Image (cartoon, helix red, strand yellow):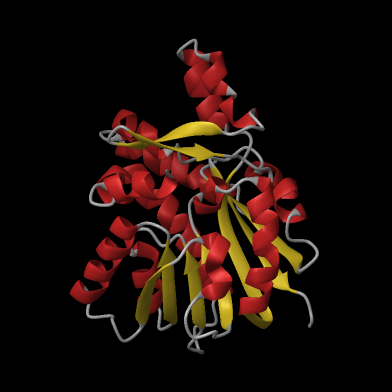
Amino acid sequence: MKKQAFDEVANSYDDIFSHSAVGKLQINRVYHFLKKLLDQKKKLSILELNCGTGRDAIWLAQQGHKVLATDISTGMVETAIHRVEEENLSGSISVQQCSIQHISQIEGKQKFDLVFSNFGGLNCLDEYNLRSSASAIDFLLKPGGHFVAVIMGTFCFWESFYFLAKLAPKKAFRRWNKEGIEASLGNGQSIKTWYYSPKQFYSFYKDYFKFTEVQPIGIGIPPSYLDQAFINKKRILKVLLSFEKMMENKPLAARSSDHYLLCMTKQSD
């Protein structure tokens, strides 16, 4: 079960990804693009889907915004609440347990300036459930509001190169599997995962949203599971980060990166 798998890794998830050298670089690239999108002079209301341990909600609140963070996992929600309290941000962040499929039922029935989902949370949904979420997200957004999702695409240069070098062609192109695969979360846990190209993902939401931009996340920076290979190679990571920055605003790069950030704007009511 998806919920149980994330419950099991809630206490170790940040150590596996967020605190790793590679993970930090990818996270900072997402924040770089969000900073350009967010109105720094206005306090925005933000709904975060699959908030995990609360890392992104805390960053958004530290930028001066109000956040409702949601997640299906009891363990993740408990961890997020604890982190929010530690940061003394309870006045800026509320945390609710809620699946994406039931997001229209969140308490308060408020409207948001931004709906945000980071690092492949929406890859845990099949095509049917993604299409079904479109009207709910549209309903929860204010006119002109944004929907920003960071998604794992159908092809990752780093991943294919790595597994081909290890003579594992099935893993090298596993993202092409339209039926989804069991992707590792660490600690012996896995989750059914589907991969979507930017064009395919946008097609699920195009009736409600206008395409704004797509940006690569992890075209130069390697996937987090390769962190150990780069842990003592700071100079190489610096070069890879420079290449990552060079690929900004290049949609073709987003089709070959570990993740991509897709921004959409709510169509007029």
Q: Which residue: 53% across, 47% down? A: 124
Q: Is residue 267 above or below residue 185?
A: below
Q: Is 210 above or below relative to 25?
A: below
Say whether residue 249 is visible: no
Q: Residue at x 46, y 34 (%)?
A: 183
Q: Position of residue 154 (x, y in %)?
A: 64, 36
Please state the horizontal and vertical placement of residue 191, each as a whole percent of the image.
45, 39
Q: Quadrant of residue 202?
A: bottom right
Which residue is pictured at 45% across the width and 60% down the height? 50
Q: Is residue 173 left or right of residue 69?
A: right
Identity of the residue drawn at 31% across and 87% down:
91
Q: Position of residue 207 (x, y in %)?
A: 80, 65
User: Horizontal placement of 160 versus 21: left or right?
Assistant: right
Pick the front one: 7 or 237 = 7
Percent coordinates x, y for residue 86 in the rendering: 19, 73
Q: Report the quarter where the C terminus lies.
A: bottom right
